Amino acid sequence: MAITGYSPISSSLYNPNIDSVAQALTSGQRINQSADDAAGQAIVTSLSTQINTQDMATRNANDGISLLQTADGASESINASLQRMNELAVQASNGTLNASQRNILNLEFQQNLQGINQVAENSNFNNQNLLNDENSSLNIALGDSASQINLPNLTTDGLAISSLDISNPANAATALSGLSSAIEQLSTSRSEFGAQQNGLSSAVDNMQNQNINAYAARSQINDTNIARSLTEQVRLNVLQDSAIAMQAQGNQSRASVLQLLNS
């Protein structure tokens, strides 16, 4: 007659759960495969997509802010030249000067005109020209939306001052009028730079706030509860050790029976 050993508890019953808990503790994530929580995995994937999109949109917005700061810095140099040209025009309008002295002033005046064009032509960000009308606008991608940056033409042609000179009092008076309009135009452009920077800064703040909330929501769903997982790991280890002990006891009992039968 055959003797069949009976083991009510199998150690293999607990191995899958132990492996799952160990994986959660090792990775720090509660959901390591879709089978762990199918609905939770879908939500985590959606939140991760949102976070990654907003992270890149934030980077794009910060690049846009840097571009505007570059343009504004170059505009400050142009403003300095216009202010100096205005001073020279006022000086050349003075009746106490002779033609030779006005010509000397006009030389500096013309050099400033050239300097304005040099700044406008050479101001760029990542090989994008900013102030010479080559790029009148640029789109900043902000995920599902976009923000448009408007760029002015601050060359002497764009400011309508290319033909000015101060070689005589009449020309100096004309130059003063043209420079007044150019300074006002430049001031308006710099105000727009500031407004656009503020708009992008607000967009960055908003996206960062959204990301904080998205990170928190994803963490709630996906992060491992360390205390609970450690407790579960201890519980499963105890059960597994108990099962192994009972299995060993069962094997020993069968061996004793066989020994009796053989004696």
Image (cartoon, helix red, strand yellow):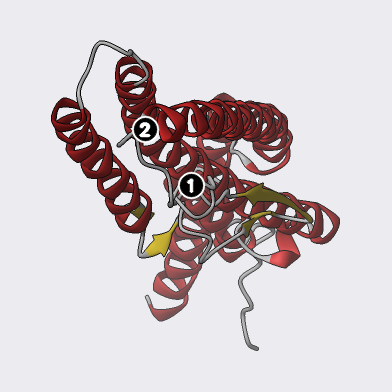
Q: Is residue 95 left or right of residue 181?
A: left
Mark found first going from the N terminus, 1 or 2: 2
Q: Amino acid at mark 1?
A: Leu
Q: Marks 1 and 2: which is nearer the front?
A: 1
Give the secondary structure at mark 2: helix
Of the residues shown, which amino acid type is indicated by label 2? Gly
Distance (Cα) linking label 1 and label 2? 13 Å
At label 2, counting other C-alpha atoms closer than 10 Å, the crowd grade (few under 14, some 14-19, many 20 or more) is some
Residue at image coords 58%, 50%: 151
Tag 1 residue: 154
Q: Residue 164 location in percent, x, y?
A: 42, 43
Location of the C terminus by quadrant is bottom left
| Residue at the image point whose x is 36% and y is 24% from the top | 89
Which one is nearer the viewer's eye here, 27 or 52?
A: 52
Locate residue 52, reporting x and y percent.
60, 53
Residue labelled with disc 2: 73
Residue 232 in picture, x, y percent from top left:
60, 36
| Closer-to-camera residue (12/111) | 111
